[in-house]
Image: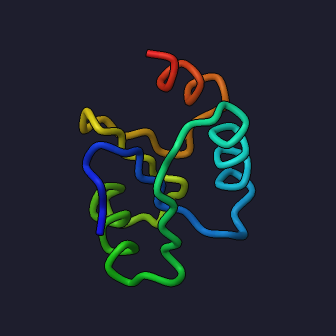
Amino acid sequence: MENQNQIIMYATRWCPDCIRARRLLDQKGIQYQFIDIDQDPQAKEIVMKINHGNKSVPTIIFPDGSILVEPSNSDLSAKISK
């Protein structure tokens, strides 16, 4: 089950942007919950709802409720450094 005090990354294992975002978080030692939307139909529905019908990944939800979709490394770094 999802932890509301942790970053949640909805992603796929094959998506280059997802791999890049995971690598950035891993390098910075940021803990997050990875949810593969290819393996979790409910997660895919959540992503599609957030992104107006699109399966845009990574969709990253932060404990403060903010969301980044397909963020650049600089946008993701700025968010996690706050």
Residue 76 in the image, given as x and y percentages of width and height: 56, 30
Q: Residue at x 42, y 64 (%)?
A: 54
Above or below 30: residue 54: below
Above or below 18: residue 21: above
Q: Quadrant of residue 14?
A: bottom right
Above or below 41: residue 35: above
Residue 16 in the image, given as x and y percentages of width and height: 75, 56
Q: Which quarter of the rendered picture does the N terminus lie within?
A: bottom left
User: 5 or 38, which lies in front?
Assistant: 5
Q: Quadrant of residue 74?
A: top right
User: 37 or 22, which lies in front?
Assistant: 22
57 lies left or right of 29: left
Q: Residue at x 48, y 74 (%)?
A: 37
Q: Quadrant of residue 78?
A: top right
Q: How many marks?
A: 0
10 lies left or right of 67: right
What sort of colour scheme is used for the picture? Answer: rainbow
Residue 82 in the image, given as x and y percentages of width and height: 43, 15
Residue 38 in the image, given as x and y percentages of width and height: 54, 80
Q: Residue at x 35, y 39 (%)?
A: 62
